Amino acid sequence: MTTFDVSRSTVRTPGRPPEGVRVRGELRAGWAEVLTPAALAFVADLQRRFGARRLELLAAREARQARLDAGELPDFLKETSAVRKADWTVAPLPPDLLDRRVEITGPVDRKMIINALNSGASTYMADFEDSTAPTWAALVEGQANLRDAVRGTISYVAPDTGRTYRLAERRAVLLVRPRGWHLPEQHLTVDGQPVSASLFDFGLFLFHNAHALLQRGSGPYFYLPKLQSHLEARLWNDVFVHAQQRLGIPRGTLKATVLIEHVLAAFEMDEILFELREHSAGLNCGRWDYIFSFIKTFRADATRVLPDRATVGMTQPFLRAYSQLLVRTCHRRGVHAMGGMAAQIPIKGDDARNRAALEQVQADKRREVGDGHDGTWVAHPALVPVARAVFDAGMPGPNQLQNLRRDVHVSAADLLAAPQGEITEAGLRHNVDVGVQYLAAWLSGSGCVPLHDLMEDAATAEISRTQVWQWIRHGTRLADGRQVTADLFHDVLADELQGTPRSPRLVEAARLFDQLATAPQLPDFLTLSAYDRILQITP
């Protein structure tokens, strides 16, 4: 099989798109180095080869959800028990992924990339998914920004202060999170059909940067979101094998960490690692999306209605079981178990509240390092030294792979245990407030939004709208005895909007949140519904 000529990616004129490929988004100055004919041909090749399997797996998700709605409960798979019982390990990790004690995440805008790489974190996950609103400009410019970052040429001048930002000598290791399998990219079509957003984000980054990263002693490293089964991991592995062959780089060069952020994936952690074993860099506790998935998966089950989001922390038994099983599974297979996000941000002007927020972060990270996690996530550079101090104290080596956690035994019932806690008017109001404000920002092009001293992204907005839907669907009663109905929700929505400055985006966000929260059937992802609005706003 012939390989792609990566050197053509430096062409700075758009050229003619490959046959069957149409760029439906605008072409601004400077974007030609991203949307080269060769790069588009590479993405088109991935789409033609793997697009049909992706659609089959999405159909399988729908069929599985129908069975769950009818009362089926998840369990560990009988047909893969041999994989779980066998002794095997993943391929050895590259040196720059051995110590990942603090990872920072954020969107792919230019200033964020520089600050994250300079933050002192071990790694930086550049996020095309939950913290990036998928406007065409954000996606293409994000690819251009990462291309410059990989080559060390990225800089940024703040328009308000004139301050110049450049990369420091010591930088975090770069990982990239493409969007999930469920999302399309409507701005690029192949043979008349929208390309998979996963393949678009992955393909462009890999094509432009794989060789440059290898020349610098690193490699193309990824985070894979929203997987629900080992078959979806198998598809990613096949994509990796094919892409490496087409680019002429050694098989096994790519490394990927899978976010276990769906309750169904928690039953297939061994299998997911097995499918990706020559490309695996471990698993991560994607806690916010995991909570969202629990609500969505058991939406028809009145016995698994979740309490206020604020009470659903990692000490809840079902989340504790999931995180400890992840550590045991990863360490048995010789690979990293990454902890979850600390979403707190510095609180200026209030030392007491800021100190309390930092104490929350420290307690969360002490739990993680004590459980055996090999690293953790933060959303703000100011939290890097806080998390690092905890992990330095509790993990003197580069990781804890030797801590096999043979004391952990998790059953299906443990993973399915309904969390306990109250449902309150304050919790309802918080969901409405966060959900609407986040959607308004997302529709305006911002996917990562500071709200109430936390950095909110699409995952927490998903919790907000699905909780409201679940409470209405099951006629849940608040702690004061009132029943959550559509009328009560509409009263709260109107009340919350009264104290918020009106804008066209806020009005549209409120309308969309209302539709999502009161729909007869729970919509799968708000980012799918809201993406249609993005296309109307920024075609």
Image: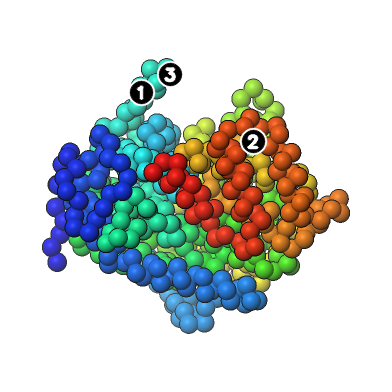
Horizontal and vertical percent for residue 86? 44, 77
Classify 106 as above or below 254: above
Q: Residue visible at 63% across and 58% down?
A: 519
Q: Residues within 10 Å of mark 2 (few under 14, many from 20)?
A: few
Q: Distance between the residues labelled 3 and 1?
A: 9 Å
Residue at the limit of the structure toward the right, as seen here: 481
Q: Mark 2 — residue?
A: 452
Q: Residues within 10 Å of mark 1 (few under 14, many from 20)?
A: few
Q: Residue visible at 38% across and 40% down?
A: 138
> Visible in this render: residue 446?
no
Q: Mark 1 — residue?
A: 157
Front residue of this view, candidates 32 and 100: 32
Q: Mark 3 — residue?
A: 160
Q: Residues within 10 Å of mark 3 (few under 14, many from 20)?
A: few
What amino acid does circle 2 point to?
His
* SS state under label 3: loop
